């Protein structure tokens, strides 16, 4: 699994001109699922992302996690994170999981984060979405389960 995480002041998802989810301060997580990924990969990412110390403490140092500050998370499925651009000009998505497998692990990841007490909003799996964010910092990281 591959995740692009962005610390945000706010973020939202719109589908067909209707806002379906919104968070204030927290993390936007763009999540890509590979063919060989399992629940173990999702568990790893859920633990890693919720525990990453990327929020500022009282001294302005990145020393607090999502769990520490009780912020929200917006999770958006994004198979294009598994795109391979090494050959030619058109990305190959052969490493991305098929939709049924990807959806199962996406939902499992969301559930694992919720079980940690984090308020989670989501995009709409498989839909064309407009994702809005105000990046805080900016802080953007890539986290992989392998």
Image: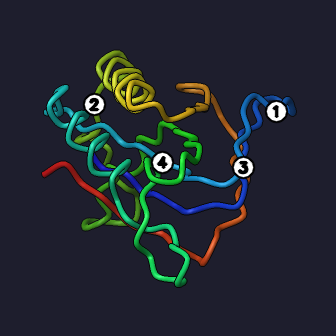
Mark 2 or mark 3: name the one nearer the start of the chain.
Answer: 3
Image marks 1 and 4: residues in contact by CB distance under 8 Å: no
Which of the 4 quarters of the picture holds residue 119? top right
Q: Residue at x 38, y 65 (%)?
A: 53
Q: Residue under circle 1?
A: 19
Q: Secondary structure at mark 4?
A: strand
Cα separation between marks 1 and 4: 17 Å
Q: Nearer the viewer, mark 1 or mark 2?
A: 1
Mark 1 or mark 2: name the one nearer the start of the chain.
Answer: 1
Q: Residues within 10 Å of mark 1 (few under 14, many from 20)?
A: some
Q: Residue under circle 2?
A: 97
Q: Nearer the viewer, mark 3 or mark 1?
A: 3
Image marks 1 and 2: residues in contact by CB distance under 8 Å: no
Q: Does residue 72 sit above or below 89 in this rendering?
A: above
Image mark for residue 24: 3
Mark 2 or mark 4: name the one nearer the start of the chain.
Answer: 4
Which colour assignment does the render follow? rainbow
Cα separation between marks 2 and 4: 15 Å
Q: Is residue 22 left or right of residue 143?
A: right
Image marks 2 and 4: residues in contact by CB distance under 8 Å: no
Mark 1 or mark 4: name the one nearer the start of the chain.
Answer: 1
Q: Residue under circle 4?
A: 30
Cα separation between marks 3 and 4: 16 Å
């Amino acid at each position: 699994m591959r995740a692009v995480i962005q610390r945000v002041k706010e973020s939202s998802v719109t589908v067909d001109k209707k806002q379906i989810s919104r968070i204030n301060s927290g993390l936007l997580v763009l999540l890509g699922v590979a063919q060989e990924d399992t629940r173990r990969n999702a568990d790893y990412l859920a633990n890693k992302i919720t525990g990453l110390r990327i929020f500022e403490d009282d001294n302005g140092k990145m020393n607090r996690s999502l769990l520490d500050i009780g912020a929200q998370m917006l999770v958006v499925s994004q198979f294009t994170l598994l795109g391979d651009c090494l050959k030619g000009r058109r990305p190959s998505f052969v490493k991305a999981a098929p939709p049924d497998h990807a959806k199962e692990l996406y939902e499992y990841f969301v559930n694992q984060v919720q079980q940690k007490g984090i308020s989670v909003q989501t995009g709409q799996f498989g839909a064309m979405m407009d994702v809005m964010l105000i990046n805080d910092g900016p802080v953007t990281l890539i986290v992989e389960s392998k």
